[in-house]
Image (cartoon, rainbow, N blue to C red):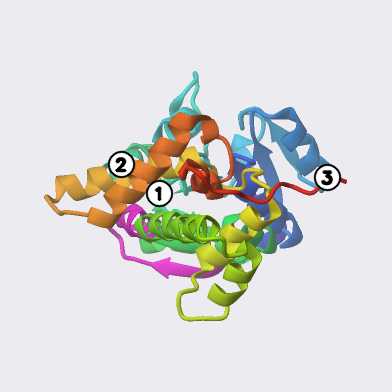
Amino acid sequence: MENEKSYGACVIGLGAMGMGAALSCIRGGLKTYGVDVVEKSLETLSEAGAAGVGRDASAFARVLDAVLVLVVNAEQARSALFAGQPCLADSLRPGTVVIVSATISQDEAKAIGRELEKRGLLALDGPVSGGAAKAAKGEMTVMGAGSPAAFAKAKPLLDVIAEKVYNIGPELGNGSMVKIIHQLLAGIHVAAAAEAMALASRAGIPLDLMYDVVTHAAGNSWMFENRMRHVLDGDYTPLSRVNIFVKDLGLVAASAQSLKFPLHLAAAALGMFTTANNAGYGDEDDSAVIKIFPGIALPEKKRD
């Protein structure tokens, strides 16, 4: 195992989950680097004790043992790894492990993994779940697929960012497929929670009462408890955006189509999030999908 004090780990994408992962790396004693296009995020990580930050990883690519790519989609992942001359993938030392944690299609995960392996790098198809709160605590869930060598090289990093790491086997793409199936459930749960609370509002049931009942009864889910709290607070500050579920449920639909497999509930949830996005709520928290229902009264955010 790598000496953790000299183990160089870079997190690309310092959003809600990426920043949590990077801060967990620092707390875990790893020599931590961060990459993002937002200057404020770079400043935050630098002040927390990062060994280096930048808009790209060119300045520290040669000292890295692991790269965690925690961006939004396949296009951003490809840009982070393969754009520029030389690109990051060409600048890393052979044997460096690259963990692609964006939610992407199975085919994209395979293709990116093959391009990394051609360069002598170790590829881990490793999407994550847990949201900003779990990321901040170093308690994410990782759905990993890759070679035993990739898992071994990534272990010091995975140990500090994740509470649970699933080894789904050596076939790249299978980690992404598990995440896509997970997102099917997550998206449906948020949509169903919003629908239930919207119905309660229309029926004149106090939403705080409805929330209390559900969270102490069999109809509860983690998504209901977490996201409908945002609705009660009238706070749609994005931790996971509406347009993220438009993307993810779109991946769910495309994956099912390739298998000629019907997904009735996922299709309905995708329609709800797409409607919310088109109504102007795309950059709000995904709980804002509740705003598509007409004739309901929702709590407003308390002003300081």
- The mark found on residue 303 in the picture is 3
**Crowd rating for badge 1 (residues with CA inside 10 Å; few <14, some 14–19, many 20+):** many
Spot the residue most to the left.
Answer: 260
Query: Which residue bears the numbered disc 1?
Result: 123
Please indicate whether residue 164 sits to the left or right of residue 237 in the image: left
Q: Looking at this view, is 299 or 120 the one in front?
A: 299
Q: Are marks 2 and 1 in contact (CB under 8 Å)?
A: yes
Mark 2–mark 1 distance (CA, rounded to whole Å): 8 Å
* Secondary structure beneath label 1: strand
Tell me the kind of residue under disc 1.
Ala
> Where is residue 194 drawn, in percent x and y?
49, 55
| Quarter occupied by the N terminus | bottom right
Spot the residue most to the top.
Answer: 85
> Where is residue 9 drawn, in percent x and y?
62, 49
Query: Which residue bears the numbered disc 2?
Result: 114
Q: Residue at x 30, y 57 (%)?
A: 174
Residue 171 sits in quarter: bottom left
Which residues make up the magenta segment? 162-182
Q: Residue at x 30, y 49 (%)?
A: 268
